[in-house]
Amino acid sequence: MDAGQRIERTLDIAVAYAEAPGAPPRLAEAIRYAVFPGGHRIRPRLCLAVAAACGDDDPQGAEAAAAAIELLHCASLVHDDLPCFDDAETRRKKPAVHVAFGEPLAVLTGDALIVLAFETLARGAAKRPQRLAALVGLVARAVGSPAGIVAGQAWESEAEVALSNYQQAKTGALFAAATVAGAAAAGATPLPWRLLGECLGEAYQVADDLRDVACRQEEIGKPAGRDATLGRPNAALLLGRGGALDRLKRLSAEAIEVIPTCPGADALRAEIAAQTRLFLPASLAHEFA
Amino acid sequence: MDAGQRIERTLDIAVAYAEAPGAPPRLAEAIRYAVFPGGHRIRPRLCLAVAAACGDDDPQGAEAAAAAIELLHCASLVHDDLPCFDDAETRRKKPAVHVAFGEPLAVLTGDALIVLAFETLARGAAKRPQRLAALVGLVARAVGSPAGIVAGQAWESEAEVALSNYQQAKTGALFAAATVAGAAAAGATPLPWRLLGECLGEAYQVADDLRDVACRQEEIGKPAGRDATLGRPNAALLLGRGGALDRLKRLSAEAIEVIPTCPGADALRAEIAAQTRLFLPASLAHEFA
């Protein structure tokens, strides 16, 4: 089974728990709608790739970590799209959860997905229970306060924004969680893996900024040009399209350089190179080659 | 240190993590505002009382479980008060979080508190890491879908409501989590403790319904008469004040009867009797005696 199939299967099993008999039917439907079909599943792929590079002695634990990170990513999309934040109409080429199910269920779907992420981590710890505390801690840090994606979103409510804090928390934190949790799930020391995740998170942010500026809504599945509309910092607006592409190339190369010594470093380098090519949509990817 | 002090200290340490350097200042402020000053801390007191009755061989783990449950309770209050749900202006005798900090920070405060709850559980597992997976599972089940407080709130978005599912999930689930997690944190088998939590959860719901119908806003710290306004089921409206008081007495007596055999059963019976007296505010408590 390839990484993509492992991720979809683990997410499907996790969501099935939330849909179990007794669940409010529309909440269950909204949870599945928020998770499937997914995007490129970049974060869980990264998590599994790092676990594989570290020896992958507990595939079930690695799959749980990967799925937990994707569930938290989905939760953040559902809440970020709410009227009080981005008020986005579309996401992943279909109506946003609050448009399809209403605002109350969108709030609750995000909440349920956060809870489901930690529940999934705990279920995956059957074989190596002694690794669970570190995994919960690493994943929680990437999502909560002071420096996770929730904190990143909260910087938009501050009068003065520490820009590096904002971007690191909003995008980098979950990428860093993908690498450190992948390592921890495989029994490796997580800390040396943080830099790889941070590099990739910054690269992804630059690519996302380029997409926002350079692509049409049909291609990226959500409204384009939102950063300019909402006055948010955007690398492609700050550096220009060429400058942002150069930065994306530099960060992608840097990511490959900072991979820690590990049994599967060569395969991981190839995987990271392939993954970073997916950061840009087709209309921009040829400029990245 | 008494139970109340242990709870406040553990909550304070947990919230301090979320306020660490780098946190968005207003988010940090809103998180503390949502947790302090608290109410009677009924759920975490119950959790510690059960852990004590079961031998309390890991006080740090029990405190973490108690704090996690209270953080999740606070998260649910913040989200339930949002304009898209109850649109409540006040909570715990001060402006609700969305009134004091705005809607975006209220959504994020709830999210951050959910994450912090699981982070707190993981930090508390240092001495008995093998208990963490069960604790995370028990607590998650009480909050998420299919039958936790998020599911309970989601029943309000369904055309047809299964009333017992709704009440069990909305109030009973977190009380049941308090008892089963208290037992699990002390190394006891959690399942026999569920019924006690469910009885107390139902008793608390009846008391809350009585408060909603019979008390003034100044006494309960939140708007009174909301259930009638919002068309929600309420035991005191269905059974009358006398009928609801009778039911509360019966449930409180039943709770004391269903306490499983354990080393500290006598002390726990006294504690439960004292706690259930706190369910009602002063103006009604004399009728309960």
Image (cartoon, coloured by chain):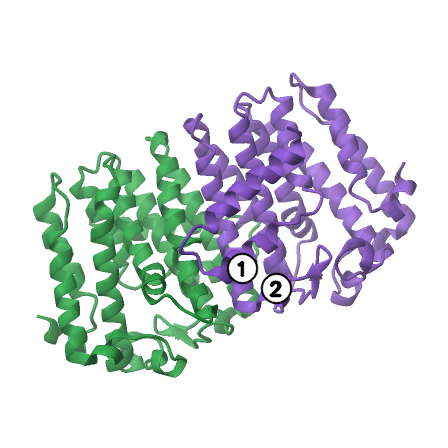
Chain colours: A green, B purple
Tell which subunit mark 1 falls on.
Answer: A
- The residue sitting at the top extreme is B263
Q: Which mark is residue A131?
A: none
Mark sitting on residue A108:
1
Amino acid at dot 1? Leu
- Label 2: which residue? B157
Residues marked 1 and 2, same chain: no
Q: Position of residue A255 (x, y in %)?
A: 15, 56
Q: Quadrant of the N terminus of chain B?
A: top right
Residue at position x 40%, y 38% from top? A123
10 Å crowding of disc 1: few (<14), some (14-19), many (20+): many
Element type at marker 1? Answer: helix
Residue drawn at 72 percent across, 37 percent down: B199
Among the 4 quarters of the image, the one containing residue A92: bottom left
* Residue A1 visible in the picture: no
Question: What x and y, as percent, mark residue A125?
Answer: 36, 35
Marks 1/2 in contact by CB < 8 Å: the verdict is yes
Viewport quadrant of the C terminus of chain B: top right
Q: Position of residue B121 (x, y in %)?
A: 48, 38
Real-space Cα distance between discs 1 and 2? 10 Å
Q: Is residue A253 left or right of residue A207?
A: left
